[in-house]
Image: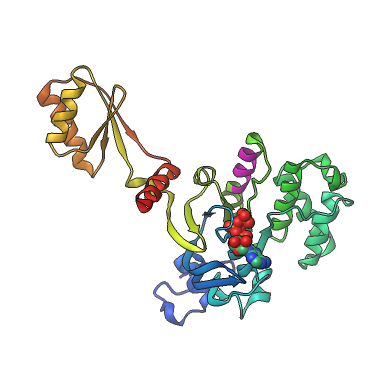
Amino acid sequence: MITLMPTLTLPLNADLRVLPADAQAYLQGVVIATEHLTKRYPGVTALDGLTVDVGDGVTGLVGANGAGKSTLIKILLGLTDATSGSARILGRDIQDDGAALRSRVGYMPEHDCLPGDVSATELVVHLARMSGLPSDAARERAADTLRHVGLYEERYRPIGGYSTGMKQRVKLAQALVHDPDVVFLDEPTNGLDPVGRDEMLALVRRIYDDFGISVLVTSHLLGELERICDHVVIIDAGVLLRSSSVADFTRSSAQLAVEVAKDADAAAQAMTSAGLRVARDGQLLVVGVDGDETYDLVRDVIADGAFGLVRLEARRHHISEVFDEEAADVAV
Ligand SMILES: Nc1ncnc2c1ncn2[C@@H]1O[C@H](COP(=O)(O)OP(=O)(O)OP(=O)(O)O)[C@@H](O)[C@H]1O
């Protein structure tokens, strides 16, 4: 027997087809699944047949302004209806089970929507109460959550006097206070300076690492999300461009940086003749890795030519570089 979630116990060889949809989703690690999801506004198709699975962990939803990120989140939350298509969260259909899902989902909206005349504590306790927690538990959860996001004595001051960074933290706290299974964070780093961005990104990562809450976080900056995400989904004009784990995204771009003691040009030529993909980066030879045999070939070419190996170092592109190259290929 294996225990899935606190109350769900299944035989090891259970037939997935007869399990409740909720249990199937957990077993397969799919937190969000959309199928041909389309949203048309007058004159604009915000989402265009989007079919994508989002798994456990921290997933970045990346796209330029207007790509459809907020629209997707709003549909998932039931704040707006899709024109066509369907979506499931934790195995439950958002249309059929919207009310039940709301208690299991947290949401940090993009825009400033906080009342200025109440304190962070008052607001977060109030929202915890609205989510169904008894008074004492709501106070306790609110205090814990505000501490987690890094608001201490300031939490008793009116929100109107807060900096942008503090307001973002209040929005994050209210998304977490009812202990959801998954949170949607819409552009949490918006308006923050570089230090504030780094702190917010670290907090987002800890939501999953410390509490096991899955995260779907949006940004128009691929570079900042790849640092904290397990998986990225890239959309453009409502269409899926790519969905893959961060590791898979960069695996195909693995390279070896090779420094030789002498005759770098001749070494590059010898490597090319041996079938390797070689480029020059100053004094370095940058060799594309096509598998384990690349390492053997590089070693043999350097030994045979007596070029003298000074340094051999694995390199990986950032996702943003890979994606820029892919986008350029598409444009050509
Ligand atoms: N209520 C609405 N009525 C009409 N058009 C809308 C509405 N909401 C969004 N749109 C349009 O749908 C498209 C997708 O918008 P959406 O807000 O989902 O993008 P986004 O990726 O979240 O970008 P941003 O970060 O700028 O909000 C845009 O062209 C936008 O102008």
Question: Is 42 above or below relative to 155?
Answer: below
The answer to which image quadrant residue 191 occupies is top right
| Image x and y of residue 258, in percent | 26, 27
Q: Which residue is painted at 85% across and 46% down in the image?
A: 160
| Image x and y of residue 281, in percent | 31, 27
The answer to which image quadrant residue 152 occupies is top right
Q: Would you say the magenta stretch is mainly helix, strand or loop?
A: helix
Q: Which residue is painted at 43% across and 45% down in the image?
A: 319
| Image x and y of residue 96, in percent | 61, 81
Question: In the rendered structure, which segment of residues is drawn in magenta?
Answer: 197-204
Task: Decide if residue 116 is in sight here.
Answer: yes
Residue extending furthest right?
117
Magenta stretch: includes residue 41:
no
Question: Is 136 above or below relative to 309?
Answer: below
Which quadrant does ligand 1 occupy?
bottom right
Residue extending furthest top?
262
Relative horizontal placement of residue 250, taking residue 24 as reference (left or right): left
Question: Is 168 above or below relative to 298?
Answer: below
Q: Which residue is painted at 66% across and 38% down in the image?
A: 196
Specify the quadrant that holds the N terminus.
bottom left
Residue extending furthest left?
304
Q: How is the image coloured?
A: rainbow
| Image x and y of residue 15, in percent | 41, 79
Q: How many marks?
A: 0
The answer to which image quadrant residue 111 occupies is bottom right
Q: Which residue is painted at 19% across and 23% down in the image?
A: 265
Q: Is residue 79 or residue 48 the one in the foreground?
A: 48
Task: Decide if residue 104 is in sight here.
Answer: no
Q: Is residue 168 or residue 265 the one in the foreground?
A: 265
Relative horizontal placement of residue 290, taking residue 191 as reference (left or right): left
